[in-house]
Image (tube, rainbow, N blue to C red):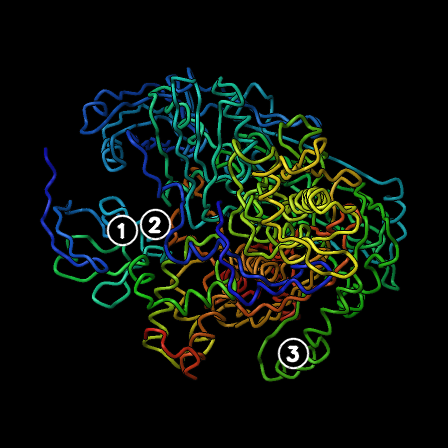
Amino acid sequence: MNARMEVPSQTKDAATTERGYIGQSAPRAGAKRLLEGRGAYIDDMRLPRLAHVVYVRSPHAHALIKSMDLSAVKKQPGVIGAFTGSDIAAYCTPWVGVLGHLKGIKSAPQHAVAIDRACWQGEPVAAIVAQTRRQAEDALHFVQVDYEVLPVIVEMADALKGDYVIHPELGDNICFQRELKTDDFDEAFAKADVVVEKTFKFARHTGVTNEPRAVLADYQPADHSLTVYQATQAPHMMQDIMSRHLGIPESNVRIVCKDVGGSFGIKVHVYPDEMATAALSVMLKRPVKFMADRLESFLSDIHAREHIATVRMACTKEGDILGFDLDDLTGIGPYSVYPRTSGIEGNQVVNLTGGPYKHKAYRAKLNVVFTNKNVTCQYRAVGHPIAVALTEGIVDEGARALGMDPAAFRRRNLIADDAYPYTFPSGLKFEKLSHHQCLDKLLQMMDYDGLRAEQKALREKGIYRGIGLAAMIEVTNPSPAFYGVGGARISAQDGATLRLDPSGMLNVLVSVTEQGQGTEAVFAQIAASMVGVSLDKVRVITGDTAVTPYGGGTWASRGAGIGGEAVLQAGKALKTNILAVAGAVLSVDPATLDVVDNAVVDRLTRVEQMPLAEVGRVAYFRPDTLPMDFQSELTVTRHYTPREFGFTFTNGIQASYVEVDTETGFIKLLKHWCVEDCGTVLNPMLVDEQLRGGVVQGLGGALLEECLYSPEGQMLNGSMADYLVPMAYEMPDIEIGHVSTPTKTSELGAKGAGEAGTAGAPGAVMNAVNDALEGLGERVVEQPMTPERILKALGKI
Amino acid sequence: MTEKRCDISLRINAEQVERPVLVRQHLVDFLREELDLTGSHLGCEHGVCGACQVMVDGKVVRGCLTLAVQCDGKHVETIEGLSESGVLADLQAAFLNHNALQCGFCSSGMLLTALNIVQNHPDATRDEIRDHISGNYCRCTGYQAIVSAIESVLVARRTGELAGVAR
């Protein structure tokens, strides 16, 4: 937050196009500070009387807490207090992670700190507060808990079978189910010439934000107010939740989100330890900080994915796709995560499978089940990587069965670019997509025919290279249909306040948060362009519920599209108001004026009439010189909510080129391409690297990342030495291309781009691996595609 | 029981520092907690992510795997000092202009590895740059912008474009 713009001089004159800075690769001004080690992450804060909390975490995946003795803990040096779940519950009410529009979804009440029973290894069971983190951690060893170990459910199939039920009051282990079937489904599959079927498995992985989760809560008893400094994506959502569960009036709760060291969906949920930290601040009437360490991040940050899904596809012998059939099983841990629920991921898989293609028949079945592992919830690209890999995996299977080239098969079946608006069998509505333009661009960028020839030539020499394609659609700019209609108090609307300061500078307050994507930078570009000032005159502030307009924050690829439109509208309104002041000063019709390069000019001659600093000076300090009936309004607020469509879909396509060592099972990523249509591109440099980062995150899930659990529900690889993440050397260069179909739902025309890379990469690389191994063994259908799984598919082990 | 402390005397950036430190305290905790040098970050505290990197006597080390007492008599340089001395200036400018960071949490460590590359491997290729930075975890970028930023500085230094920048 509080980005200070010190844009390098080469960008100051960049506002040469019709849309000003929009579309320019301006560097992020706020990033300079971060490069000098002067970031302001939560753990960098210093407050008087700050106390530190650490949590005692259950060593068992499922156990009754028969008794707990904290008396020895309380005698340790520096310890301020030690608290059980019941102690915390007196200050923080429990929650249930369900939403009204996910019909039938159920979960059990969850406390900030477990009271009688722990349901996953890592669930907080007690809190220790001390003068220093070190003292609190030392005191951990003096906790005495008598556990009675209960049966555990680790496998999703066992959960579904339900011989043992984790929450007996729920009746079974099913959190959420959904089934849909189009009228023509049976007919389509009956008349198909070819039906292909595969079962795919996707492991659990997790976000591994470089900065672990962090919260610092500061309660002031004098006015019953709570300020929470939190690394979060959704400050107003957290304000509402802290208010309701801690019993503090909404406006007395202030959430401040300073620099955040990566989020990706990890930092948009309600975490028991973070709620308990706020409760402890209220209880102890002093600031309390919780900073997760890496080991507890692996046990308590939300996990994601974990699906076993069977997908079938029906085709004619000519190569037309007639329909898809999906059966997805996903496991979410013991609770549906609050408040967004853990039903959304599976629901997205149902919504999106088959998404880019023009078939009309679809049947889907989804089971979301409870297990005794860490909870899962929305993580970057929610459901998309699964839906895309399932769709594109079975599309390649179909192309093989028909003896068609995968690119040609896709060209035949992708929804035509002139078919919009279009309603997809799952009920989704697409405004305007560009699958064919994207495919054409991709094939040209990668020299598809040339690569195919190279692949063939090398195969004759025993070098196994493969090409994989993955077309995709992506949910962005969500309307209230995502959460609001289900009863979640999560804003679908965002707002921007623009103020012209006396010196002619722009102060911009936006409800969307900055997590490093560059949201503040693009807001500055939009504001500067709309008002007519140079970029160095703009200051952007985000991430403070006491300061910014009310809004949803950063998730579901909504920041640029929704927040950006609010900034655009506020900028237009402010410009009108600036011209009104100038018109009054100059005694001319404001319609004859314009603002360009920090000055009011004559609209026709472009001759400068007065600098903005003069407008500011007169408006603020000498309004006595203005007409009696004139009041200047140099602060304006505008909001924007997408409402015409449930989501503003983007589309794109990716390609992966790999080489597989059939002796070791190692995969070398040679090159990756991504063509994305995110509508108006606000800052190509920022979008391109965000797409690349997304691709790498997707490649991590496809090749490396897996949360491994023992049959007892113990996580086996909860450290960065054991849990593999993508590092620079294994990652390929990634070429990005754009097709631009601006959404007409907003004047800005921007759609989201943040999740596209993660959505498409796993499907593309899986198809590339299977292309490389064509004819050598079984298909690789399990992600991550580890060397072991490759060799198993090849029948070598 | 009072925990054992050791007196250490060391140079940190441009200042001489004398402190009693807990024997078990690692260097980054010492820098962050005792000296408020919060530019070095803790991402994993087990030597994998590289966010904690600092320089000790001119060599890049993992600050979380180095004890403060080990630095007695040594010269420790952090992102704060290296920024103020100007030694990182062209790398910082290149990172900004290539968008070679998003959240910035890895940047302190990444810049130190980058400094090591430009100082000791001036002819590194893109593949070699990737190899060198493969001990620094970045979750936000696709690494490509980082490679490009470092490469641009190598090229500029080779061709003398940035004459006057501290080497």
User: Are the residues at dot 3 and dot 1 in contact (C-beta closer than 8 Å)?
Assistant: no
Bin the neighbour count of mark 3 within 10 Å (Cα to Cα): few under 14, some 14-19, many 20 and up.
many
Q: Residue furthest top?
A: A90
Q: Disc 2 marks which amino acid? A: Leu
Q: Chain of mark 2?
A: B
For image coordinates 15% across by 44% down, the residue present is B22
- Which circle marks residue B28 in the picture? 1
Q: Which residue is mark 3?
A: A455
Q: Residue furthest front?
A: A625
In front of the other: B124 or A12: A12
Q: Quadrant of residue B85?
A: bottom left
In front of the other: A121 or A571: A571
- Which circle marks residue B42 in the picture? 2
- Circle 2 sits in a helix, a strand or a loop, which is it? loop
Q: Nearer the viewer, mark 2 or mark 3?
A: 2
Q: Disc 3 marks which amino acid? A: Gln
Observer able to see residue A476:
no
